Image: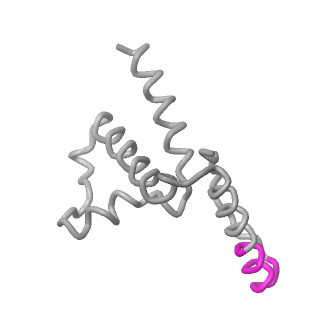
Amino acid sequence: SKDVDRNVLKDNQQLVRSIPADNKQSLKAHLKPLGFTGYKVSELTPNLTRRAQCSNWLLYYREELFGLSVDELRERRRLKKEAEEKAALASGGEQKWSPPVKEVF
């Protein structure tokens, strides 16, 4: 029903927003060696799209978050931010645009 679908859609959108841009193509990267060539537009349905997005989040969780403490994750974030700042200074201080990402932790 529309009431159920609306809630699922909102939850799925929040889940996708929580994935950093570096990990957005995890599903494709992990399945390509197994022969996955991508989806065809004619194959896409709302359910298939949601499943793919949830699978992508699970891969992100497994690769980046699983088994680490919150302190370790914060330290990783701090180091990554410092490296990005150094790279920005080295390139003349230009800030490149990045999509907004809601942090999971």
Camera-side residue of 96 and 27: 27
- Decide whether residue 91 is among the magenta residues: yes
Q: Is residue 80 above or below residue 55?
A: below
What span is colored magenta in the figure? 83-93
Secondary structure mostly taken by the magenta-highlighted segment of the chain: helix
Quadrant in the picture for residue 32: bottom left
- Decide whether residue 4 is among the magenta residues: no
Image location (x, y in percent) of residue 59: 39, 53
Could you tell me which residue is drawn at 76 percent across and 77 percent down? 88
Camera-side residue of 6 and 23: 23
Q: Is residue 67 above or below residue 15?
A: below
Could you tell me which residue is drawn at 32 percent across and 35 percent down? 46
Left/right placement of residue 40 relative to residue 4 reads left
Q: Is residue 85 above or below residue 17?
A: below
Image location (x, y in percent) of residue 62: 42, 54
Image location (x, y in percent) of residue 85: 77, 73
Image location (x, y in percent) of residue 24: 46, 57
In the current view of this chain or complex, which residue is farthest to the left?
35
Camera-side residue of 86 and 70: 70
All told, the count of numbered labels is 0
Camera-side residue of 105 and 102: 105
Q: Quadrant of the C terminus?
A: top right
Left/right placement of residue 43 relative to residue 17 reads left
Q: Quadrant of the N terminus?
A: top left
Could you tell me which residue is drawn at 17 percent across and 66 percent down? 35
Could you tell me which residue is drawn at 67 percent across and 61 percent down? 77
Q: Is residue 38 above or below residue 46?
A: below
Way the structure is coloured: one colour
